[in-house]
């Protein structure tokens, strides 16, 4: 496709530049941050060897020390393939360097920054939902642990899970029983059975 200089109908990325000696030149394409050294954007998302496994609810940007700089807080699942050995950690980054790392007792599901007092300067605490508890970290140190009350489990649900552990029930039958209980609404199922 050959365009003249006055033709404004095509976008600038699809145009071929004018050349006086009529040699073919590649089309102009937009550059990305990774390939453009003058770009203001950092390609931090493309670090494949960072070794962080998480979800978006376990990521928070917060000024942890009220100093005007933002820290990246990540609740990392660790290597989830090593199920017997849990490696969940709360990691805090300043820039690209790891500032602090705390072990978590169970897999995290959310991280949020919150204020627990009205003292100046306003320094937030980190609330981490992990397993049946919500952990509160102040100044990146464990501060408080809220344990959620245990729910009463219906006997029929217990029986289904015990049969599954012993291998006395197949997956389809287990699914059908739990699904029927959920649809009937006669008993409240635990989150594991949903």
Image: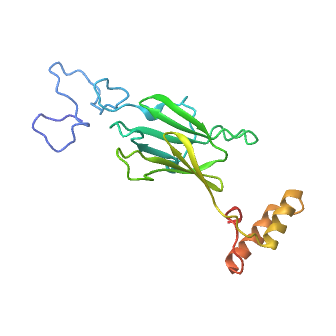
Residue 62 against residue 159 in the figure, above or below: above
Measuring 28% from the left and 30% from the top, which residue is drawn there? 27
**The N terminus - image quarter:** top left
Q: Position of residue 63 (x, y in %)?
A: 39, 41
Hey, which residue is sitting farthest front in the picture?
119
Closest to the observer: 98 or 31? 98
Left or right, residue 20 beside residue 73:
left
Left or right, residue 13 beside residue 137:
left
Q: Position of residue 70 (x, y in %)?
A: 38, 38
Q: How many numbered callouts?
A: 0
Q: Position of residue 44 (x, y in %)?
A: 43, 32
The image's colouring method is rainbow
Q: Position of residue 152 (x, y in %)?
A: 74, 70
Residue 88 against residue 173 in the figure, above or below: above
Measuring 22% from the left and 35% from the top, which residue is drawn there? 15
The image quadrant that residue 31 belongs to is: top left
Closest to the observer: 175 or 9? 175
Measuring 84% from the left and 68% from the top, which residue is drawn there? 159
**The C terminus - image quarter:** bottom right
Residue 90 against residue 153 in the figure, above or below: above
Hey, which residue is sitting farthest top in the picture?
21
Closest to the observer: 128 or 80? 128
Left or right, residue 8 beside residue 148:
left
Hey, which residue is sitting farthest left in the picture?
6
């Amino acid at each position: 496709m050959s365009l003249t200089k006055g033709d404004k109908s095509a976008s600038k990325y699809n145009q071929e530049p004018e050349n006086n000696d009529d040699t073919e030149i590649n089309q102009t394409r937009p550059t990305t941050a990774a390939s453009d050294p003058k770009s203001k954007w950092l390609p931090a998302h493309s670090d494949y060897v960072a070794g962080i496994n998480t979800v978006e609810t376990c990521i928070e940007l917060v000024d942890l020390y009220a100093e005007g700089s933002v820290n990246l807080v990540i609740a990392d699942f660790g290597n989830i393939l090593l199920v017997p050995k849990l490696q969940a950690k709360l990691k805090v980054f300043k820039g690209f360097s790891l500032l602090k790392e705390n072990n978590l007792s169970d897999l995290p599901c959310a991280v949020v920054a919150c204020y627990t007092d009205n003292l100046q300067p306003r320094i937030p605490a980190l609330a981490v939902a992990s397993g049946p508890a919500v952990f509160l970290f102040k100044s990146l140190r464990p501060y408080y642990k809220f344990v959620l009350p245990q729910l009463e489990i219906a006997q029929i649900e217990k029986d289904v899970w015990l049969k599954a552990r012993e291998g006395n029930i197949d997956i389809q039958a287990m699914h059908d029983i739990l699904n029927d209980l959920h649809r009937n609404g006669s008993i409240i199922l635990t989150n594991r059975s949903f």
